[in-house]
Image (cartoon, coloured by chain):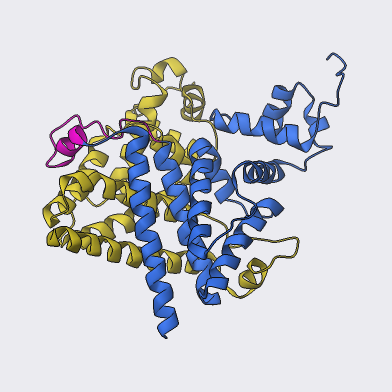
Chain colours: A yellow, B blue
């Protein structure tokens, strides 16, 4: 190997190479990352302990890139801005989703983002018992719509007769406009539901 | 290779081997499947054209295993039963999600399942223009909550002080009971939102 002019390895470079592999649908193990960076696997272990730590580094990298560190406004503005940012993040990195969802979150940037959301909901008057339940609903929503945005322009291609689906597919919008419209409708329904829930809490 | 007593290969066996690889987080290319089945890659090509067809076979396999072929009841019963089935399917196969979401759906079992849902919504009075939008919202919901159920018992482990999150994590339920509770709350909010939307449509 030629001697590098700049230090080749850092946790940032390792996370970047791992993200590239994951985005391509490739395995992102220590050996594959080492090959991509042109270093030996053993040199990687000077920077990371293994696969789990690499997943957490990727999560942190995305968090820094996509998640707003602060949001001005009422709780529903915080929810909406966070959902829009997360949807974009997940849409652009769909293969990372099962990896990061499958692991306990420790990365400080992503923890801070959840703390921002939990603090806004708690401050708005949602009871402590409800806040993490609502956070889970918001997570499900942003992940689901991120994946919807990542889906192909043609979602269904029925090859046998259908009662309803085929007819609707012919006349419905496609691609990002389709996904954007569903997201906006879902977001409105979700925010309305949360506002109603908060109003009921205040009446109790 | 020893001569097999029964025919080794079928699209079913290929889909099964591919699912095993995907569930283990392994690459599921033709070579890996051939290795797992103890056959040559070229013999696989007598049954499948390649990666895309294998993804579709896996989708169909899950559809047959999890999705109800018929549901008795009003539109909201259809929505609820389908969401429960899909959530379980996605929770048990999280690594398949980005693969199947990234590809146009042609598998007849899964097409029939979407047709069942679209027919129920259309028959209930949701306008044609709205049905596939609602289907996308339901998909986002079931995928998101499937992944939530697949997440570890401990979702957050803050290692630095937080304003709200750390306190809530200490006192909140964990594991499947936590995810079930959030799913039920989200489901109720979603069905309420759809009922309201249908009532508004009927008033127009």
The answer to which image quadrant residue B179 occupies is top left
Residue B167 magenta-drawn? yes
- Residue A146 relative to residue B173: left or right: right
Query: Which residue is more in the foreground, A51 or B81?
Result: B81
Query: Which residue is more in the foreground, B188 or A119?
Result: B188
Q: Residue B79, image x and y in percent?
A: 50, 58
Residue B168 magenta-drawn? yes
- Residue A201 relative to residue A107: left or right: left
Q: Is residue A149 visible?
A: no
In the picture, the quarter occupied by the N terminus of chain B is top right
Q: Residue A201, image x and y in percent?
A: 17, 58
Residue drawn at the location 60% of the way across and 67% of the way down: B119
Magenta span of residues: B151-171
Q: Is residue A199 above or below residue B148?
A: below
- Residue B146 relative to residue B157: left or right: right
Q: Residue furthest bottom?
A: B204
Q: Is residue B43 visible?
A: yes
Q: Residue B133, image x and y in percent?
A: 49, 67
Q: Residue A192, image x and y in percent?
A: 28, 66
Query: Which residue is more in the foreground, B2 or A65?
Result: B2
Residue drawn at the location 41% of the way across and 63% of the way down: A183
Residue drawn at the location 47% of the way across and 28% of the way down: A33
């Amino acid at each position: 190997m030629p001697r590098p002019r700049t230090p080749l390895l850092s946790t940032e470079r390792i996370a970047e190479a791992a993200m590239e592999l994951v985005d391509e649908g490739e395995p992102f193990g220590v050996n594959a990352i080492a090959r991509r960076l042109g270093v030996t696997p053993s040199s990687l272990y000077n920077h990371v302990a293994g696969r789990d730590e690499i997943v957490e580094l990727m999560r942190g990298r995305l968090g820094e890139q996509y998640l707003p560190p602060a949001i001005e406004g009422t709780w529903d503005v915080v929810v909406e801005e966070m959902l829009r940012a997360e949807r974009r993040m997940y849409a652009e990195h769909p293969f990372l989703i099962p990896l990061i969802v499958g692991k306990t979150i420790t990365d400080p940037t992503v923890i801070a983002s959840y703390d921002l959301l939990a603090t806004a909901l708690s401050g708005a008057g949602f009871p402590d018992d409800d806040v993490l339940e609502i956070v889970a609903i918001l997570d499900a929503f942003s992940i689901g719509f991120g994946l919807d945005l990542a889906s192909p322009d043609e979602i269904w291609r029925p090859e046998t007769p259908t009662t309803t689906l085929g007819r609707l597919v012919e006349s419905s919008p496609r691609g990002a406009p389709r996904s954007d419209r569903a997201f906006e409708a879902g977001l409105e329904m979700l925010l309305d539901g949360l506002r109603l829930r908060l109003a009921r809490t205040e009446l109790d």
